[in-house]
Image (spheres, rainbow, N blue to C red):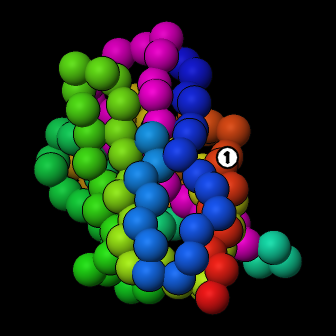
Amino acid sequence: VQLQASGGGLVQAGDSLRLSCAVSGGAFSGYVMGWFRQASGKEREVVAAFNRRSGSTYYADSVKGRFTISEDNAKNTFYLQMNSLKSADTAVYFCATDPRQLRWLPIVGSEYRFWGQGTQVTVSS
């Protein structure tokens, strides 16, 4: 399974970006999907996650109401819509999936088996 993240860039505070994560080489259905980020000098943190089996969704408190995780099953792609971006959102963003049929929604990176290469998001204030 391969993940290809895209959509990052340099934007101003208040702008929007949509990150995409294309999944190939495996069955997309049943996956749990997550977006993580790592700012310079900080640990990786979960941003949003979605369990297709249970329909449950998780957002970090820092992005609630601004970010939305979604998917397009026909395109084997999931997204992170980021609105009202802040300088604190500046980080490398990673997408991740795991093919296990989970009843819970993992929000720890170690629970995800497959990772994309990361895409840089820089928000200038």
Q: Judge by depth and name the residue closer to the eye, 9 or 104.
A: 9
Give how far across and how far down residue 109 sits, in percent: 58, 56
Quarter of the rendering occupied by the C terminus: bottom right
Residue 37: image quadrant is bottom right
Q: Residue at x 26, y 80 (%)?
A: 65
Find out whether residue 11 is within the magenta segment. no
In the picture as drawn, the residue positioned furthest to the right comes out as 41
Give how far across and how far down residue 28 sits, in percent: 33, 23
Find out whether residue 23 is within the magenta segment. yes
Residues shaded magenta: 21-39
In the picture as drawn, the residue positioned furthest to the top comes out as 25
Q: Which residue is mark 1?
A: 118
Residue 101: image quadrant is top left
Residue 7 left/right relative to 80: right
Does 22 appear above or below 118? above
| Other-residue count near label 1 (Cα within 10 Å), few / some / many at <14 / 14–19 / ≥20 | many
